Image (cartoon, rainbow, N blue to C red):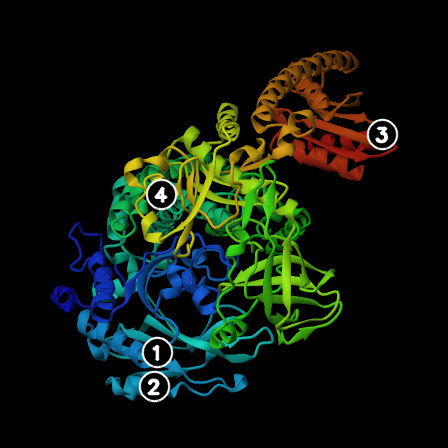
Amino acid sequence: MAASVAAAAGRLRRAIRRSPQWRGPSRRALSSEAPPIQAAAVRDAFLSFFRDRHGHRLVPSASVRPRGDPSLLFVNAGMNQFKPIFLGTVDPRSEMAGFRRVANSQKCVRAGGRHSDLEDVGRDLSHHTFFEMLGNWAFRGVYFKEEACSMAWELLTQVYGIPEDRLWVSYFGGDPKAGLGPDLESRDIWLNLGVPASRMLSFGPQENFWEMGDTGPCGPCTEIHYDLAGGVGAPQLVELWNLVFMQHNREADGSLQPLPQRHVDTGMGLERLLAVLQGRRSTYDTDLFSPLLNAIHQGCGAPPYSGRVGAADEGHTDTAYRVVADHIRTLSICIADGVFPGMSGAPLVLRRILRRAVRFSTELLRAPPGFLGSLVPVVVETLGGAYPELQRNSAQIASLVSEDEAAFLASLQRGRRIIERTLRRLGPSDVFPAEVAWSLSLSGNLGLPLDLVELMLEEKGVQLDSAGLERLAQEEAQHRARQAEPVQEQGLRLDVHALGELQRQGVPPTDDSPKYNYSLRPSGSYEFGTCEAQVLQLYTEDGTAVASVGEGQRCGLLLDKTNFYAEQGGQASDRGYLVRVGLQDVLFPVARAQVCGGFILHEVAAPECLKVGDQVQLHVDEAWRLSCMEKHTAVHLLNWALRQTLGPGTEQRGSHLNPEWLRFDVATQAPLTPEQLRAVEGTVQKAVGQDEAVYMEEVALARTAHVPGLRSLDEVYPDPVRVVSVGVPVAQALNPASQAALQTSVELCCGTHLLRTGALGDLVIIGERQLAKGTTRLLAITGEQAQQAVDTAVMPQWQRRELQATLKALRRRANTAVRKLEMGQAAQKTQELLQRHSEGPLIVDTVYAESLSVLVKVVRQLCKQAPSTSVLLLSPQPLGQVLCACQVAQSATPAFTAEAWALAVCSHMGGKAWGSRVVAQGTGSTADLDAALSTARAYALNKL
């Protein structure tokens, strides 16, 4: 095995010797000659080194969609997928629980949220929103500082052949406030490896102490840096590799406690490493980007990329090259992983990225429409070998990018016109109005990212009203908070110390297999067995382990076994009660059950004393459980029906269920039609009518790896894993030769299910909406609720869609009739006014109109019949309100504008006005119409 590493190292060293020496910032046009060292070889050498020479297990990159981590918008570091190990919450039966030495290349996105490089991309030669992080990990102390430092030094100097005298290291210099001394152990390790003290630096916690978040595992880190100057003059250091030694835990009170188990977490950006190995000052000059930059040049009318920044980058052309190249990589990676441009969270950030790329490509690079989508094959060519999901989804990525590009271009054109019109009204020192910027933004009407609006204004030398914008953003946030669903209380949890103590004591994970102990009676009803268990540990609300709890206390209860289903896999937790054996008349309500590192924690309200060692009997709420079983089986049938209707490539994006309803997110190219919705319901109802058996069995995870049609999600599954199959025994379903999983619903699932589909009764989809481009959310009900749906206000979604289409057609016809009626009314009033006013430059009068729309039509018709006349009409309404509409003759502009005329009159009436230079309208309130008319005449005569 070591031979393959040695061969790779030899190839890389020979390539490095052929590399050009370091130069200043690139001013060259891109050459078609391939760089001497390929990114794929650098990536492969890293993985081979840790696998073959140091016995690490290679794991695939996780999706950039965080798995069960609401604190992240995107996966932004290699360690994200391993957080359950660091926190001690990993399922002990899962494959991950066996990880000790691991290495991989992780896709990372840093845009939005706490760690965001979005605003810096393009402005310099190194920032990216998407990058690859090469990393190696050691879990539970399998190795620590000495081995981690030695491996890193060996790889950089012996495999990659980087000269030792170009490498510097930094280490943690201590933090007296936290009571932490300097990391002299790391310092001495580097000295022993041959790093002279003159190339070692010590820093405080801001630079060399890494933390996962406000709380959680953390520890000192040591960093390896590369000197760009090469000993000529002052060092110019760039960080290559960060080695984190997790040995502490940051508590909620801010204090640090030792971790029960220590871990190593390292990360090195492939793009920066590649720049070093290829002798480039910029990551954009490496072979990860040069094919994209060449493709951009060939597809646009812009000059070739030359690596300029700042004031030297006239016209911001090179900035645009970098933005477009970076953003199309991010878009391709995210869409391949199921994150689509949308209106909130990560999808909203991705929408900003796409629209930012469109604006830079069209306005600064003069790219033709549809250009961004044409770059997707280039991304697939450069990254598809490492991340095959890009190859599988390339057509969908290009289609989504092109569709959103076309929609945004139309908005961009309108936005540019609005900005230009607004700027013409501003004085030399005026700031751009926040209200206009907000109306252009993603939160307003046109969907332009605010950073783009700011950039467009910056390029014109205009400052935005930032204070006003902040006020509007706060108002929007408050509005969203009022509209948001209430956040469910998290409940009691076991922290890393509690879990570590349980593992130290040798307490086995909770046996929750009794949750599957239920059966069908001959009558068709379900019988749920009880479960007797022993109290192993009690926890107070703050997580403190105690020997007993008293009357009225809310506590966490850990048992040796349970029949309660703990919330996971999208299924709500069971609820119910327990009694102490021998005291059947005292009920201890169980509000919920949660799983933490294989231990099931029950949230209990104690009506009297309960202590460690007590024997208890558990009873689940049978109606609650049965409803959840119905919904979970319905989710599987719905998933199957969607594949049958939309095609076998249809993918589930998530689900959640409780006794009341189920929610199902599915990847779709377009919203479902009423016919498709009806077909999906029909497929489910057919399976229900056939009353098929539901088979469930635990099998080795490896047996499920290559079964055509088997459904699974991007989750960590236990081994053995539970398989749920409708109508076909599990053994038959898992036989690849049978193709059974292509003919019925077969999924990996730990949830509780009906034993026969007939008990489901019915399923009705009552809601459907687009979460984001490419993702549809369905809401459904089952059982008696579904059977009553048509007889109540709730109705099937396909039927609602048909009714909505009918209503839309009726509304269109009604609007046409209203417009005809308004035009007739306007024509009549126009004739009346023309008879009252002789020809002249001005008509100012009152007329009754039912709406502002009618009043505007009267003004337009008057001006059409008397083109040289400027008209302003007021229309008194009930309760003192007055409508205003005006139009200025073309011959009177630009000195005389309709917008200013309406504003003068409506301001006099304490109201507001809006419009253009030619036509405007507004409202106000006054009891003195004559004074308002006098104001209108005086203003107009002054301008005329």
Mark 3 to mark 1: distance in Å?
85 Å
Find disc 1 in the rendering and name its residue: 144
Q: Nearer the viewer, mark 3 or mark 2?
A: 2
Mark 3 to mark 2: distance in Å?
85 Å
Find disc 2 in the rendering and name its residue: 187
Observer-nearest of 378 and 601: 601
Q: Which label number is shown at residue 731?
A: 4
Disc 3, disc 4: CB below 8 Å? no
Give the mark, 1 or 4, whose residue is nearer the N terminus.
1
Label 1 Cα crowd, 10 Å radius (few <14 / some 14-19 / many 20+): many
Label 4 Cα crowd, 10 Å radius (few <14 / some 14-19 / many 20+): few
Tell me the quadrant of the picture where the N terminus can be found.
bottom left
Mark 2 to mark 4: distance in Å?
57 Å
Instruction: Assign a secondary structure to mark 2.
Output: helix
Q: Nearer the viewer, mark 2 or mark 4?
A: 4
Q: Is residue 620 above or below residue 425?
A: below
- Left or right of 575 on screen, residue 292: left
Label 2 Cα crowd, 10 Å radius (few <14 / some 14-19 / many 20+): many
Q: Amino acid at mark 2?
A: Arg
